[in-house]
Image (spheres, coloured by chain):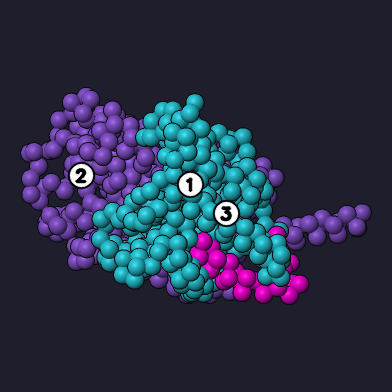
Chain colours: A purple, B cyan
Amino acid sequence: MKALRPLGLLALLALAVLFPLLFPNPAVDTVAVLTVLFATAVTAWNTFSGYSGYISIGHAAFFGIGSYAVAILCQDWHVPGGYLPFLLLPLAGLIAVAFAIPMGWIALRTRKHTFVILTIAMFFIMQLMAFNLRSVTNGSRGMSLPIPVSWSGAFYDLPFYYVGLALLLVAVALSWWIRNSKYGLGLLAIRDDEDRARGLGVRTGAFKLTAFVLAAFFFGMVGGLHAYFVESIFPAFAFDPLIDLMVALMAFLGGLGTISGPLLGAVILVPAQQFFTIWFNKPGFYLMIYGAMFLAIILLLPQGIVPALRGRFTKAETLAGPVRSGDDGDVAAAVAWAGDVGDGERGGGA
Amino acid sequence: MRLIVDAVITGVLSGGIYVLMALGLTLIFGVMDIINVGQGALVILGAYLSYLLQQHLHIDLFVGLILTMPVMFALGVGLEAAFIRPIRWERTTLSILVTFAIALLIQGALSLTFSTNLVQMHAWYVSHSLKIGSFYLAWVYIFDFLLSVVLVAALYVVLNHTKFGAGLRASMQNRTAAQLIGIDVERVSAITFGIGVALAAAGGMAYGATSAFNPNSQYDLISRLLVIIILGGMGSLRGAVVAGFGMLIVEDVTSVVWSPVWASTVFYMLLVVVLVLRPQGLFGRLESRRQ
């Protein structure tokens, strides 16, 4: 079973790389580009929110900042359409980071519940700025990006797909590395019991902030790539609250805090969303379906697909209960309590 | 100077409406640890209900509240039973996502029924003004403010002078302990959610009477309401009142002194300053580990 894993991963990677060649249909490939972009975003989001338990409903702000960064840089530096704008993506990510550091610093001073709300509020503040700072963002009239005129038809999606896939691979590798590092362990400890983690010497503030900023970096790059892909941006669409919901929903559907879960969530939900938008093109109806889908997932499958499957197949885990932050906290508390008792007994013996 | 005084007066009068809506939100959080992100959409729903009654049955906006508030109360109780109570783990975090989903459902349903055209309510008190010196004030602001005062006073009486209120306050202080001394916390929660939504109905009517709205207005509303309850301190009723008035006064003064475009930005900056100095908000308690 274990030996098959690398092979399976290689097969998946090969499928991902060959996908646009196997399905050279522009409509399919457009969905593929969006799937890859959202998969990158949700992986980065999960590295922060999934591991640390601090749910951010405001990272779409960095998506918007990245979008505007690429649009403004292209305009100011007269970047022509083609491969050059892709080189601006790391810069867009860094600009998002420049915003994320002070925003994260302020937001992370508050604890989990207030933090969630504060990220929502910050998101709307940034959206408001995009509307109001007309000299920079051109207000509600939006901005257009250079158009790669020489890319036509079925070829148009390919550069975006492969750049997106590269971002995705970096994000997944980073997420995997963090999950298996001492740093990731620190983040998980924060999720389970922040005060105790702090007491044990985890530098909680720095850990949370770096993960927050790292996720923002990827959101900035994804936003920039998305902006270039759709060719024009407007405040309401670059700073779209649905992006955050979508990302959170993917993570919850697949399994918060796992690596494969959010990817699975993206692969299911992005095509589903595209399908709904096309088939129910009345905006209201689409929102309702979206809300209903969301409710169904959270109420019926709160722990996500991957942990649910894992729980079914692994007996030990079923006995120990599904992997959830609350339960983990109890386990951690129980272990610590047992430790306390042990100490006490030792004390009594001496 | 005159302009600033006028701005403070409008700020206080329209602040009452936001206090009403924010109280519903903070009450729900205090009792249930639930953040109702759908409050903005519920406010807009309340506004549309009042609008419907006025258009089709010619019922005055303020009188219509006698009908809309109980309906919205029932809706709140229903929503709590159907979607909030089943959440068993990570209640607070998941409640945010669930109520966001409810908000989308409501926004979608409203867009389908009423389209996204802006709606403006009409009544004599919207178009007629009271003259104070050289300053004109639409009657609706005064009525809205009176409505807020009456409802907040009623809430105060219910909270402090009834048995239900005592149970509610006990649940706010300590849910488990309240349960242990025999308070039916589930029932208190359902009724609290209902009250919160009923307050949204009143707030929605008052909001709709002073500004044009469409289903998308919920985003603007909810971001303001969330900022108010964070600034006041999560779960603090006093904080919601102070922050609600504060927000509208700061906004109105900024739009007179500087520009309406920057009105809410200045308030948000104020929020940032407060949070840097006091992460728990003005009147909030520090959130720390659950025991």
Per the model, the C-alpha gap separating discs 2 and 3 is 52 Å
Magenta stretch encompasses residue B178:
yes
Q: Which residue is mark 3?
A: B149
Taking B100 as reference, is A213 above or below it?
above
Q: Which mark is residue A229?
A: 2
Per the model, the C-alpha gap separating discs 2 and 1 is 43 Å
Question: What is the chain identity of the residue bearing mark 3?
Answer: B
Q: Residue at x 29, y 49 (%)?
A: A37
Q: Quadrant of residue A159?
A: top left
Mark 3 crowdedness (10 Å alpha carbons): few <14, some 14-19, many ≥20: some
Q: Which residue is mark 1?
A: B14
Q: Residue at x 25, y 33 (%)?
A: A138
Q: Is B69 placed left or right of A162 in the picture?
A: right
Taking B87 as reference, is A211 above or below it?
above
Q: Is A297 placed left or right of B246 in the picture?
A: left
Task: Tell me the SS state at disc 2.
Answer: helix
Residue range in magenta is: B173-199
Would residue B148 be visible to someone looking at this image? yes
